[in-house]
Image: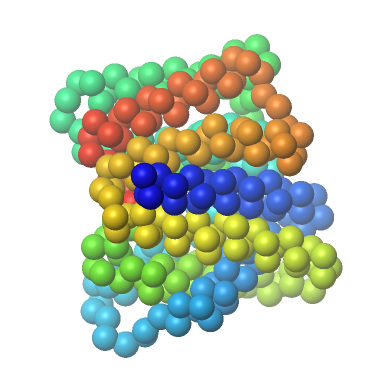
């Protein structure tokens, strides 16, 4: 029950953060907003967690760096997708990443059936009348899905090394350093109010939810946490409607539900790998 609450808090924070960030895309652009958000989150987590830099093996550092790079590209791709297609659609497509990871480790026909059902859901979102197919937006969303898949694998690796919140803080710092040229290049373009929105987005969308996911991974299995992530698409639709006034067609909403349920069943049945988003 505690793990479910943590994942719910994380999902609410991430989707609220994405909606807040999207309000700045027209002024600053999705990539600068993502980069500056990660920079603020890294500074906050370094100050609060104060991770140790010494005593780590080469393997631990490789895992931390890979985790951070996957995190950086995943966020940039997602924000670039949200700039082009409805947020609920982008997040639903991103959720396909962990589904593919779970499918790759499956050994039964029912997992394959779940994957087919998830693809039917994507079809309902994209190719029915009033659908939301945008080639560039979908390319970015699928890029985010690919990185989300890698992210779940490296999150599991970092978690198993015992790095915990220290490893998470260092990985967020790697993500911030990877996008630092973009952050610095646009830092003076943002007003104090915009920086306030970015700071709120950093705490709601990175520091708090990633910490919640890491802590939930300690008290329950990766399988359970991965299944709980299936609430993200539906949560994104609700938050986008409330904050961005975005609505999607009933058919597309059905597609979101189909993908979420199929993904949850797939991750549960295969004992999914991801333990943090």
On screen, residue 236 above or below 219: above
Relative height, residue 269 to residue 117 (above, below): below
Residue 156, image x, y percentages: 29, 56
Q: How many numbered discs, if any?
A: 0
Residue 5 horizontal/vertical position (percent):
44, 47
Residue 148 visible somewhere in the drawing:
no
Location of residue 181 (image quadrant) = bottom right
165 or 27: nearer the viewer: 165
In the rendered structure, the answer to whether residue 211 lies left or right of residue 23 reads left
Q: Residue at x 30, y 42 (%)?
A: 224
Position of 46 relative to 108 (above/below): below
Q: Residue at x 26, y 48 (%)?
A: 221
Extreme residue toward the top, this view: 129
Q: Is residue 226 positioned above or below 49 on the image?
A: above
Q: Position of residue 1 (x, y in %)?
A: 36, 44
Observer able to see residue 264: yes
Nearest to the observer: residue 117 or residue 70: 117
Q: Quadrant of residue 204?
A: bottom right
**Left or right of 130, for residue 113:** left
Query: Relative to residue 220, is residue 92 drawn left or right?
Result: right
Which residue sits at x=71%, y=27%?
A: 247
Q: Residue at x 20, y 21 (%)?
A: 109
Colour option used: rainbow
Task: Locate residue 159 relative to residue 197 in the image: left or right.
Answer: left
Instruction: Residue lying at the far bottom in this picture: please name it.
Output: 54
- For the residue pair 50 and 31, the one nearer the viewer reads as 50
């Amino acid at each position: 029950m505690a793990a479910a609450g943590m994942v719910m808090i994380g999902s609410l924070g991430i989707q609220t953060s994405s909606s807040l960030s999207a309000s700045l895309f027209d002024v600053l652009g999705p990539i600068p907003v993502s980069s500056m958000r990660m920079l603020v989150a890294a500074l906050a987590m370094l100050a609060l967690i104060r991770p140790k830099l010494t005593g780590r093996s080469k393997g631990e550092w490789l895992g931390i760096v890979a985790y951070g790079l996957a995190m950086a590209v995943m966020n940039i791709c997602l924000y670039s997708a949200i700039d082009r297609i409805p947020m609920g659609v982008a997040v639903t497509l991103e959720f396909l990443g962990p589904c593919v990871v779970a499918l790759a480790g499956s050994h039964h026909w029912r997992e394959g059936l779940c994957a087919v059902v998830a693809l039917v859901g994507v079809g309902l979102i994209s190719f029915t009348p009033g659908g939301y197919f945008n080639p560039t937006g979908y390319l970015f969303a699928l890029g985010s899905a690919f990185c989300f898949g890698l992210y779940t694998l490296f999150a599991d690796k970092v978690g198993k090394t015992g790095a915990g919140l220290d490893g998470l803080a260092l990985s967020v710092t790697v993500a911030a350093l990877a996008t630092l040229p973009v952050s610095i290049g646009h830092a003076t373009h943002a007003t104090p109010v915009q920086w306030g929105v970015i700071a709120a987005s950093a705490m709601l969308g990175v520091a708090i939810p990633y910490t919640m996911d890491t802590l939930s991974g300690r008290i329950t299995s990766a399988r359970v946490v991965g299944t709980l992530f299936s609430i993200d698409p539906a949560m994104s639709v609700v938050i986008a409607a409330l904050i961005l006034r975005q609505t999607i067609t009933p058919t597309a909403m059905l597609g979101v539900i189909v993908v979420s349920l199929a993904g949850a069943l797939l991750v549960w049945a295969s004992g999914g790998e991801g333990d943090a988003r």
